Amino acid sequence: MKNLLKRITIDTEVCHGKPTIRGLRYPVEMILELLGAGMSHSEILEDYEDLEHEDILAVLQYASKLSQVKSIYKVDVA
């Protein structure tokens, strides 16, 4: 798993510092949106030929790590 997470990079010069895949201009959030819209791994790989299957797995693992919080509190906005 740690090796897959190395595929996620953050560079202030690429995509405004958003997490991307291997420094390419594919933000993690874009791949998550494609998956959430119902695209399969193979469809994404077909549309974005410089991506690899492990890149998509890395995106999913990265998102999983981000969601691992101990608790969430509701914030009241005045």
Image (cartoon, rainbow, N blue to C red):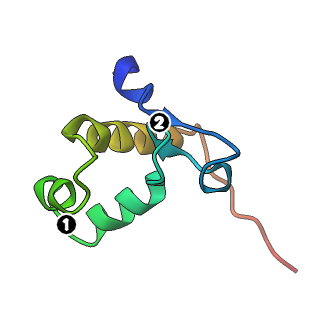
Residue at 48% x, 53% y is 25
Q: Is residue 61 left or right of residue 10?
A: left
Which amino acid type is marked by label 1? Met
Quarter the C terminus occupies: bottom right
| Residue that label 1 marks | 39
* Residue that appears at 79% across and 72% down: 76
| For residue 38, side relative to residue 6 (left or right) | left
Seen at 35% across and 36% down, the residue is: 58
Does label 1 or label 2 sit earlier along the sequence? Answer: 2
Q: Quadrant of the N terminus?
A: top left
48 over 11 or under it: above or below: below
Which residue type does callout 2 highlight? Ile
- Residue extending farthest bottom: 78
Q: Nearer the viewer, residue 47 or 7?
A: 47
Q: How many marks?
A: 2
Q: Residues within 10 Å of mark 1 (few under 14, many from 20)?
A: some
Q: Quadrant of residue 21?
A: top left
Mark 2 burial class by Cα count in 10 Å: few <14, some 14-19, many 20+? many
* Residue extending farthest left: 42
Residue 35 pos. (x, y %): 27, 62
Across and down, in percent, residue 36 comes to 30, 66
Pointer 2 residue:
8
Rounded to the nearest whole Å, what is the CA distance between mark 1 and mark 2? 20 Å
In the rendering, at what x and y percent does residue 57 appear?
27, 39
Instruction: Decide which of 56, 72 is in the foreground and name it.
Output: 56
Residue drawn 52% across the image and 42% down it: 66
